[in-house]
Amino acid sequence: MQTVFNPQQIILVLGLGETGSSVLRWLQHFPELTVLAADTREQTPQLERLQMTFKEVVFYCGEAHLEAIKKADIIITSPGIAQSYQPLRDAKQRGASVMGDVEIFARVIATLPHKPIVIGITGSNGKSTVTTMVGEILKHAGYNTAVIGNIGTPVLAVMSEIDALEACVIELSSFQLESTDNLWLDAATVLNISEDHLDRYSSMGDYASAKERIFKHCKHPVVNREDSYSAAMGHKISAAHSFGLNPPANHLQWGVTQNQDDAWISLGSTRYLKVNKLPLAGSHNVANAMAALALTTAVGVDPTQACEALMKFKGLPHRVEWVATHQQITFYDDSKGTNVGATVAALKGLSQKVVLIAGGEGKGQDFTPLGPALKTYGRALVLIGRDAPFIEQATQHCGIPVVHAKDMKEAVVQSVALAKEGDAVLLSPACASFDMFDHYEHRAQVFIQSVKEVIGEKV
């Protein structure tokens, strides 16, 4: 395994969550390097374990992290630390290099004599679904493939097997892209842009610009021609591939065409897959599938093979996942719906009226787009969490009942009372979870348990 750092330099790993831990594990392979580790928090949950594991590393927590920043020549930041953080800006000004783990991955890949195919996926919604679809397509086509990045497996976790890998599929957040400059991608996409992380970015334009960095070194860019931000990025690029739910205009475009009564996923004028053959419901999943097709066929996968893989793909946990059906009311878990765009897509994707459970930490979003979607698809709105009053205010003209619940179980009880036969009860919060829960998976677990308890009480 080859390092990309000079042994004379002091390296700081800043942020001791999962990403920081993975960087420390990778740096262990290079005992000649001087490594520091720091966290802005005084109480870091896994500090004792990290100190036991990485005995040669000096740790700085709380205010002491500022001292570590001043000592470092190279600072490897976790995605949660913004590049606009003033101590990092000061470090750059004195000549320190600041980067993320994806940048290290990119530099290692550049040194390999036989480089794997590398595909990058970003966007506000659908990233994990499309990333997994692309991974499944490449595996079906015979590539030894790693699916890594924001989806869960840190990019440096696959370094020990990198020589054997034939393809890497990376889900990339805007936070990760901020600290990445040299990632060369065989294909990449910005799936869509909707309001998110406006507690970190000064405007939607700044947020979109962070996403657009994925195209900086990209052989085959793929854009969503029905998303204004993504499409605008495509206009700057010659020969960009695209996808959309409208009919395709040429051989670089995936879209939906009609043949008699059937809707088909098509590339240009060639039909490949009936829409109703996709196991995942909803127009947003048709778009996700076409994004995956555009990315994989751009790097040489046969479209027919790619469609075979998609017909076997059943979806991911916590993304409009069926939980239970009771007295003709169906319960769905979409706890991963942490922004307004994701929740609107979930509402549109279901084929029945919906009692929506929403609320949490809103991250500075504008909730008004929920109003029209609820007016069309909603039966009622049940609100939880810190930003419930803001959601109520933004949706006050949606024309359906709006009620508040103090916790998840009460929200499920209220939803069952408001739902009619044939309706869905959907947890799709349009918010982050950390005001009430440990993470979105914990929120889903509490919802699922609450549904089981309420159904049990009703039986």
Image (spheres, grey):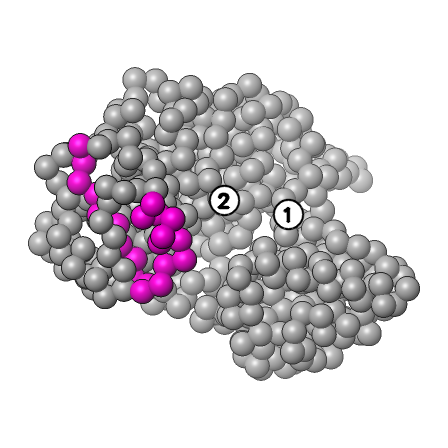
Residues at discs 2 and 1 in contact (Cβ within 8 Å): no
Residue 162: image quadrant is top left
Residue 166 percent across, percent down from the top left: 44, 21
Of residues 348 and 332, the one nearer the viewer is 332
Residue 264 is labelled as none
Q: Quadrant of the N terminus?
A: top left
User: Image point 44% across, 33% down: which residue?
Assistant: 119
Residue 112 percent across, percent down from the top left: 30, 22
Residue 246 percent across, percent down from the top left: 61, 45
Q: Which residue is mark 2?
A: 151
The local secondary structure at tag 1 comes to loop
User: Image point 52% across, 70% down: which residue?
Assistant: 435
- Label 1: few (<14), some (14–19) or many (≥20) C-alpha neighbours in 10 Å: some
* Image: magenta residue range: 32-52
The local secondary structure at tag 2 comes to loop
- Label 2: few (<14), some (14–19) or many (≥20) C-alpha neighbours in 10 Å: some
The Cα atoms of the two marked residues, 2 and 1, are separated by 12 Å
Q: Which residue is mark 1?
A: 317
Disc 1 marks a residue whose amino acid type is Pro
Q: Quadrant of the C terminus?
A: bottom right
Q: Would you say 23 lies left or right of 394 here?
A: left
Q: Is residue 48 magenta?
A: yes
Could one spot residue 381 in this view of the protein?
Answer: no
Of residues 334 and 271, the one nearer the viewer is 334
Q: Would you say 16 lies left or right of 404 here?
A: left
User: Image point 76% across, 75% down: which residue?
Assistant: 414
User: Image point 15% across, 44% down: which residue?
Assistant: 10
Q: Would you say 397 lies left or right of 400 here?
A: left
Of residues 3 and 264, the one nearer the viewer is 3
In the displayed structure, would residue 233 be above or below residue 419? above
